Image (cartoon, rainbow, N blue to C red):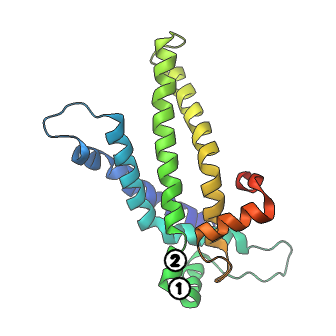
Amino acid sequence: GLVAGLQRQMSFASVRIGLYDSVKQFYTPKGSDHCSITTRILAGCTTGAMAVTCAQPTDVVKIRFQASVHAGPGSNRKYSGTMDAYRTIAREEGVRGLWKGTLPNITRNAIINCAEMVTYDIIKEKLLNYHLLTDNFPCHFVSAFGAGFCATVVASPVDVVKTRYMNSPPGQYRSPFDCMLKMVTQEGPTAFYKG
C-alpha cells in the first residue's frame, strides 16, 4: 500500500495546503487584515473536504491493498499491485467503489483539522500567557504534540468507522452510520479506539 499511500499524500496535501491561503482569503471579510479562528476552521474544513474528494480513490486503494495481503508464502493476493487494485475495484464495484466512504472521510478530516487548529492555538496561548515557554521551537513543538494527541483522541472513532466501511465487502453495511451502529452493538464503544 506504499504507492497508494504516497499517491494519497501527494494529491491530498497538494489540494489541502495549496488552496488553504486562497480559501482563507475568500472567507476573510473584505478590508480585514486579521483572520479569525472561525475563518481558519472554515478554510481548513473546506480545503480538507476538497482534498478528500480528490484523493478518495487513493485512500480506498491504500486501505484495500493493505488489507488484501495475506500472511504466508503462496497465499493468493486479491491485487497484484496498486494499479491493479484501482482497476479491480472499478471493475467489481463500478467507479463509485473508488469513492466509497467519502462522507466519513470528509467528516474525519474536518474533525482532525478543527481539533488540531483549535487545540494548537489554545495550548500555545496558555503556554505563552502563563510564561511557561517563549514563542520558539519548544513552544511550537509542545503545542503541536498536544494538538496531535487531542485530534487523534477525537477523530479515532470516525477514522475506525471510515476504514471499516471503506474496506467492507459490498452489502456488509448499508451506510457509515450502519457500520457505526453495528460496531457499538457487537463490540461496544471501545471498538472505536482499536489501533
Q: Nearer the viewer, residue 180 or 168?
A: 180
- State the image coordinates of residue 62 (x, y, percent, origin top left): 60, 68
In the depicted structure, whether residue 131 falls above or below residue 163: above
Does residue 163 appear to the left or right of 141 in the view shown?
A: right
Q: Residue at x 73, y 60 (%)?
A: 184
Element assignment for label 2: helix
Are the residues tagged 2 and 1 within 8 Å (C-beta)?
A: yes
Element assignment for label 1: helix
Q: Residue at x 45, y 29 (%)?
A: 121
Mark 1 residue type: Ala
The residue where tag 1 is placed is 90
In the depicted structure, whether residue 103 falls above or below residue 195: below
- State the image coordinates of residue 126 (x, y, percent, origin top left): 50, 19
Q: Residue at x 52, y 17 (%)?
A: 127
Q: Nearer the viewer, residue 129 or 54?
A: 129
- Asked if residue 194 can be seen in this view, the reply is no
- Asked if residue 140 can be seen in this view, the reply is yes
**Callout 1 environment at 10 Å: few (<14), some (14 to 19), or many (20+)?**
some
In the depicted structure, whether residue 178 falls above or below residue 150: below
Q: Nearer the viewer, residue 143 or 182?
A: 182
- State the image coordinates of residue 44 (x, y, percent, origin top left): 39, 47
Occupied quadrant, residue 34 = top left
Q: Which mark is residue 98?
A: 2
In the depicted structure, whether residue 185 falls above or below residue 143: below
* Residue at far top of view: 131
Badge 2 or badge 1: first in the primary sequence: 1
Q: Residue at x 45, y 62 (%)?
A: 52
* Residue at far right of view: 72
